[in-house]
């Protein structure tokens, strides 16, 4: 396109750790001895695997209660959605919106985006490549914030412990939710965004 | 090596790629483990999901979907998942998801009730639910059938399943003030309670189910008598006023008491669900069993005012039955209205006499025997009579006594009910006796008596005339004589009469004489020689000037 040759045309690969240009068939960087590969190994398979695992964990994370509150022996268990609805019914729509975005919208966006990226890369689609790589950067960015729910529950459960009066305890749902976040982060990490642009190369 | 999706350009790498595609990457273990975890949870959930039932209540007060728990002995066995109104809006339907282990709670006779704070005649319960909110109490049944729809109880059941004790069924005419939970007393100690009640199948009574707690259920024997201890029992009968009660609680909420008769030689512990009858009061309950009643009828030619149903029937002073009906009959021959009294008698109340009579009576059915026995009695003068039982209230009772003088009557042993001849009542009898007395009076020879009396009276008149003519004038003369004598006596005794004055003077003389004598004796006792020598000058007695006191004598030497 702009005349700069592709690495595979020259038969070289880049070391990701130190930026050294190695021979194509080298297994490790001659300079820093870190493993060298043309693309992230098994990227699509791994991403798929982590994505599916995350999806599977997402089901119990939503169905199981995440928090158990006991206030003056008035017990209740809340799942994520019931908590959102409870906040919404009690009038604090802002908090409800925050929780909804952090625990429902963000994971769903991740699943959708990663799924789209994987499918388009496998099909070698050349559709909206620049936007797709932008999407990937966005996914990496919001990944950090997905742990918000887990943190809130852990914090509240640690702070509110007044024996007879009121107690808040985490429930199994929050563990699955944490696993969902971890899985999606792994999936995002194991995806190689250069695969988006590989479709271009073939046709050139 | 590389595994990118680019189609390899060099021929030697192609087979390698194929091999790699066949070999599964280890990374797939992650979703497989995730799936396994998810699947195991699904299986666990599916296994732990117990039966789903619906329970209907009158109100959903205190119940909340997904929050209200179902508890048995305070262990959570399920949760209410939905509350809906019934189609006819008369009650609510609570859908309950029971735990896997709560299978026994789907038995058809399981019970569900809402535990709320309650204040009743029997105490306060469910206070802990004030803070925690209501929950549904459950009690598993014992039936072999299972059900999905239950009708919830509005009040907690008084007896939980598996509690030790026995249930019994009591028959009574009406429920009175009894209710579920009403206490059952044994010697005024509460040993059980009423569990349920319903109309008997023919609708002619009430079947009450009671539960007696464990150690005390042994006191229920085959001979135990139950009676209604509800409220205050005030009876005004031929025996007077009587007030009886069991306890304060039983006044408010009713109660049943039981006891065995003092003499019950072959009583055994009663079986579960044994049936008993509730008597009206303790006295009738503890009385010996009455046995089969016999119906009798009596006709009285008198007013039966004061004779009521349930009035006692006495036989030689023993209460053997009661009046069941008082009616009027019409007799066209005499144009009178005889009173027809129906009564039941219990031959067993005669005790030993009844046993002997039964032996003597010979064969035949009980009815025939009774008829024969009664026939014999009537022949020897058994008669019924209305008597006054209580002069204050004017209540009457029927007395049966032997009246040897009673006229013979025809007796039909085939008639049912047996008819017992009557004699007039006690007041009527009094009238008869008065009549007899008056008859006797009228037979007296009053005319003759009056003639004699007249003669005697004229004699008496003559005598009185004689007395007036002769005796009285003479009497008057005598009286006059007496009067003059008395006047004379009066005059001679009056204050200023000469006789009195002379008497006074005489008395003075006597007094003076006595004084002289005393002076003389004094002088002589001092100067006894004077008797011989005569009076000396210094020893002269000063008798004349001295006062009439003997002390003055001491003054004489100073003069």
Image (tube, coloured by chain):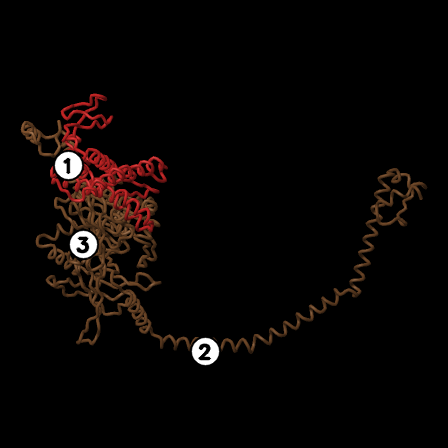
Chain colours: A red, B brown
- Image coords of residue A36 (percent x, y): 18, 26
Secondary structure beneath label 1: helix
**Chain designation of label 1:** A
Instruction: Count neighbours of disc 3 (C-alpha within 10 A) and say few if under 14, some if 14 to 19, many if 20 or more.
Output: many
**Residue A60 vs residue B138, the one in the foreground:** A60
Rendering quarter of residue A58 = top left
Q: CA distance from mark 2 to mark 1?
A: 178 Å
**Which of the image's four quarters has the C terminus of chain B?**
top right
Residue under numbered circle 1: A198
Q: Are marks 2 and 3 on the same chain?
A: yes
Residue B80 position, x and y percent, is 23, 47
Structural distance between the alpha carbons of marks 3 and 1: 118 Å
Residue B80 visible from this viewpoint: yes
Residue B323 image offset from top left, x and y in percent: 23, 61
Circle 2 SS class = helix
Quadrant of the image containing the N terminus of chain B: top left
Q: Position of residue B466 (x, y in %)?
A: 53, 77
Tell me, yes or no, whether the two marked residues, 2 and 3, touch with CB atoms within 8 Å: no
Q: Which residue in the protein does label 3 denote?
A: B347
Which label sits in the foreground, 2 or 3? 3
Q: Which residue is mark 2?
A: B458
Residue mark closest to the camera, 2 vs 1: 1
Q: Nearer the viewer, residue B266 or B365?
A: B266
In the displayed structure image, the side of residue B520 where residue B158 appears, left or right:
left
Q: Chain of mark 2?
A: B
């Amino acid at each position: 396109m702009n005349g700069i040759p592709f690495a595979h045309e020259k038969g070289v690969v880049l070391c990701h750790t130190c930026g050294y240009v190695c021979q194509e068939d080298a297994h490790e960087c001659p300079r820093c001895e870190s493993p060298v590969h043309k693309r992230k190994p098994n990227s699509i398979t791994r991403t798929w695997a982590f994505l599916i695992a995350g999806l599977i964990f997402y089901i119990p994370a939503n169905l199981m209660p995440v928090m158990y509150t006991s206030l003056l022996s008035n017990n209740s268990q809340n799942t994520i959605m019931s908590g959102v609805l409870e906040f919404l019914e009690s009038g604090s729509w802002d908090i409800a919106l925050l929780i909804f975005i952090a625990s429902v919208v963000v994971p769903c966006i991740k699943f959708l985006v990663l799924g789209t990226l994987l499918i388009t890369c496998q099909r070698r689609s050349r559709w909206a490549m620049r936007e797709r790589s932008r999407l990937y950067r966005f996914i990496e960015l919001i990944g950090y914030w997905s742990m918000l729910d887990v943190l809130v529950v852990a914090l509240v459960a640690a702070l509110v412990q007044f024996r007879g009066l009121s107690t808040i305890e985490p429930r199994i749902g929050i563990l699955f939710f944490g696993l969902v976040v971890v899985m999606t982060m792994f999936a995002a990490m194991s995806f190689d965004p250069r695969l988006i642009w590989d479709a271009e190369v073939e046709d050139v | 090596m590389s595994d990118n999706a680019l189609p390899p350009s060099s021929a030697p790498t192609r087979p390698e790629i194929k091999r790699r595609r066949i070999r599964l990457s280890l990374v797939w273990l992650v979703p497989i483990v995730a799936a396994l975890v998810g699947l195991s949870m699904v299986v666990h959930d599916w296994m732990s999901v117990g039966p789903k039932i619906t329970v209907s209540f009158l109100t959903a007060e205190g119940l909340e979907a997904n929050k209200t728990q179902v508890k048995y002995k305070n262990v959570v066995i399920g949760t209410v998942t939905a509350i809906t109104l019934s189609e006819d809006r008369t009650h609510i339907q609570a859908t309950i998801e029971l735990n896997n282990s709560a299978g026994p709670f789907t038995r058809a006779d399981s019970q569900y009730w809402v535990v709320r704070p309650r204040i009743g005649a029997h105490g306060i319960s469910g206070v802990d639910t004030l803070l925690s909110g209501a929950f549904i109490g459950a009690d598993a049944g014992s039936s072999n059938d299972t059900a999905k729809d239950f009708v919830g109880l509005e009040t907690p059941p008084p007896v939980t399943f598996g509690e030790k004790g026995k249930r019994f069924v009591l028959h009574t005419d009406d429920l009175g003030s009894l209710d579920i939970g009403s206490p059952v007393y044994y010697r005024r100690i509460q040993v059980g309670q009423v569990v349920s009640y319903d109309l008997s199948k023919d609708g002619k009574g009430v079947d009450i189910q009671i539960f007696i707690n464990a150690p005390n259920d042994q006191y229920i024997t085959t001979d135990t008598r139950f009676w209604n201890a509800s409220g205050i029992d005030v009876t005004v009968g031929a025996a007077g006023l009587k007030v009886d009660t069991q306890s304060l609680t039983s006044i408010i909420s009713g109660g049943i008491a039981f006891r065995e008769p003092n003499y019950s030689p072959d009583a055994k512990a009663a079986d579960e669900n044994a049936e008993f009858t509730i008597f009206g009061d303790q006295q009738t309950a503890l009385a010996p069993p009455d046995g089969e009643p016999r119906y009798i009828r009596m006709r009285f030619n008198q007013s039966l005012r004061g004779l009521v149903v349930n009035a006692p029937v006495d036989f030689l002073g023993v209460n053997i039955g009661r009046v069941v009906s008082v009616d009027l009959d019409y007799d066209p021959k005499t144009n009178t209205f005889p009173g027809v009294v129906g009564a039941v008698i219990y031959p067993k109340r005669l005790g030993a006499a009844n046993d002997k009579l039964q032996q003597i009576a010979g064969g035949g059915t009980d009815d025939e025997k009774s008829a024969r026995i009664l026939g014999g009695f009537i022949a020897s003068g058994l008669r019924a009579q209305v008597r006054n039982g209580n002069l204050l209230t004017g209540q009457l009772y029927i007395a049966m006594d032997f009246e040897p003088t009673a006229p013979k009557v025809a007796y039909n042993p085939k008639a049912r009910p047996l008819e017992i001849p009557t004699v007039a009542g006690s007041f009527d009898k009094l009238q008869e006796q008065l009549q007899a007395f008056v008859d006797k009076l009228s037979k007296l020879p009053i005319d003759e008596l009056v003639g004699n009396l007249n003669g005697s009276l004229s004699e008496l008149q003559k005598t009185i005339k004689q007395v007036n003519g002769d005796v009285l004038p003479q009497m008057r003369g005598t009286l006059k004589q007496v009067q003059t004598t008395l006047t004379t006596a009066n005059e001679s005794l009056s204050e200023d009469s000469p006789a009195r004055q002379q008497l006074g003077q005489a008395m003075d003389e006597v007094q003076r004489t006595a004084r002289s004598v005393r002076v003389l004796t004094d002088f002589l006792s001092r100067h006894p020689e004077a008797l011989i020598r005569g009076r000396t000058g210094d020893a002269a007695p000063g008798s004349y000037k001295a006062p009439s006191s003997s002390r003055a004598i001491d003054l004489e030497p100073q003069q």
